[in-house]
Image (cartoon, coloured by chain):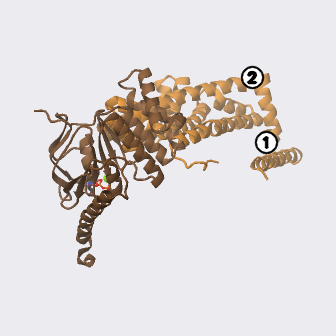
Chain colours: A orange, B brown
Amino acid sequence: MPLLIKRLLFFAALFVLWESVYHLNLVYSFWSPTLFPSPSGAVSQLYIGFFETGILRVAFSESMGRIFTGFILAVLIGGALGITLAVSRLADETLGSLVIALQPVPSIVWLPIALMMFQGGSSAILFVVVLGGTWAMTLNMRMGIKNVQPLLIRAARTMDYKGAELIWKVMIPASVPAALTGARLAWAFGWRALMAAELIGRGGLGRTLMDARDFYNMDLVVAIMFIISAVGLAVEYLFFSRVERKVLRRWGLQEKGSGR
Amino acid sequence: MIELGIVIRNVSKTFCSAEGDRTSTEVFSDINLEIGHGEFVTLLGPSGCGKSTLLNITAGLEEATEGSVTVDGRLVQGPGADRGVVFQEAALMPWLSVRGNVLFAVKKKLSAEEAGRRADHYLKMVHLSRFADAYPHELSGGMKQRTAIARALAMDPAILLMDEPFGALDEQTRTLLHRQLLEIWKQTEKTIVFVTHNIRESLLLSDRIVLMGARPGGIREVISVELGHPRNPLDKEFAALERRILDLLSDEISKVAKEEYGDAFAD
Ligand SMILES: Nc1ncnc2c1ncn2[C@@H]1O[C@H](COP(=O)(O)OP(=O)(O)OP(=O)(O)O)[C@@H](O)[C@H]1O
Ligand SMILES: [Mg+2]
């Protein structure tokens, strides 16, 4: 049986099971029926939120705007920081240890400080998203540059490449696979940080989810969780893994024809 | 007086380990060698005798502990585009196409148009025009090596330094590349220094064979090969030279082995 069919059947079964439990609950009330979401209810909330009231459309585009900006900033800042750490011994021994110390701190922990620094609002959330992605990008970029094959550098040196040009034309392109891993992690961490920050902060999918809970609209809560998962999957599988497969092949890091 | 060609004077090389001098290894000391313009010289010797080290010092990728290397009277202080290097592994940039790799070497000092013309010319010379747009991961080992050769040639260096460029190739591809290399050498009159541990390869290609040995490292003998091209291994003179070098080399190898295994090796 093809994989796709297996998965479709599994999710259909899950849907039916959940829906039946919901209907049983309507009859027997072993749990407050207003607090029990149904999958069909969630799907209709998706429709209403996107095409009738528009609240999901607004929240969705706000969250996407934030993650997009945050992700780009994290990749740029982390990339630059990673390159600096890789080429400067002094920076690596000082700034590098700060990065390593900050890296295990979940970025949502920065939200209280950020809210004070930026007087609340969107910039604080953006700050948390950027911070969520920056360290992973930094450390991967640093490793990428440090692990460039010495032979490539020697070869380039015999062709008169040196200094900044050697970094731009050889070391950075050679570490694209590592940078890509960093970017994928930055996105994943950033997306999770964004949702956490929006639950506490203002606007976007996270805030709308909290509002829906306050109105006991559990169907809408589940609908938003669908969206959060769908965005994660789409970016992970439709974007990153495709790009990654191509890059790994070209950079000769994957056996020919061994891709799925 | 300016001495033309490559002049290697009293060159010694000792590798020191990172922690002090306790485990330093002397590769060779007091090497003297002169290589004239347009000469094809091979460095031949057992593994570990310092052939690559000597080539890398000439390329400017490694520093001599003592002594100096000059090229046409100028002291070698680092790598330069006057000395093209072909490494044992092709060392191609994986993110660039075959043509992109050749362009990479020449676009710094040439106009885009001239660089493109040059790349196409040398790709044709190594019979890779059809693969100009392929990426390294799509090439066979021999094709990668030919790309690396085209890249080194496109820089049009007066000197070509080649470190076992055909070591990993099958017999047929190697024979083909030998013929192409000799062709190119005849056409362009470059000076070629070619590292190998294959006696036949050195006899097929070079004007002079520099025989190196280990412990103590250094040049054992320099043998002139006064045979015209194309050379035939079945030729009597060729075979005699081959036997002579084989004897010299096996002395070297058994000496090293005796040191390594003690008297147990003695027959
Ligand atoms: N970076 C290094 N650090 C320490 N020792 C080194 C280094 N590079 C080479 N050596 C030593 O120098 C000696 C000569 O090495 P080299 O690579 O020049 O040998 P080779 O003649 O090219 O051998 P092969 O035919 O196996 O390539 C070896 O004994 C090796 O152990
Ligand atoms: Mg070697």
Along the viewing direction, whichever of A176 and A143 lies nearer the viewer: A176
Q: Residue furthest front?
A: B236
Q: CA distance from mark 1 to mark 2?
A: 24 Å
Callout 1: CB less than 8 Å from ligand 1: no
Callout 2: CB less than 8 Å from ligand 1: no
Residue A94: percent from left, percent from top: 32, 39
Residue B251: percent from left, percent from top: 24, 67
Q: Nearer the viewer, mark 1 or mark 2?
A: 2
Comes first in the chain, label 1 or label 2: 1
Residue occupying image coordinates x 33% and y 40%: B85
Find out whether the residues at labels 1 and 2 contact each other: C-beta distance under 8 Å: no
Work out whether disc 1 and disc 2 sit on a shared chain.
Answer: yes
Q: Is residue B250 left or right of residue A219?
A: left
Residue B10: percent from left, percent from top: 13, 47
Quarter-of-image position of residue A193: top right
When the figure is inspected, residue B256 is found, relative to residue B171, above or below; the finding is below
Along the viewing direction, whichever of B132 and A232 lies nearer the viewer: B132
Residue B171: percent from left, percent from top: 45, 55
Element assignment for label 2 = loop
The answer to whether any part of residue A101 appears in the image is no
Quarter-of-image position of residue B60: top left
Residue occupying image coordinates x 40% and y 50%: B166
The numbered mark at residue A54 is: 2
Along the viewing direction, whichever of B255 and A158 lies nearer the viewer: B255
Residue occupying image coordinates x 49% and y 38%: B127
Residue at image mark 1:
A36
Q: Residue furthest left?
A: B1
What amino acid type is highlighted by mark number 1? Phe
What amino acid type is highlighted by mark number 2? Gly
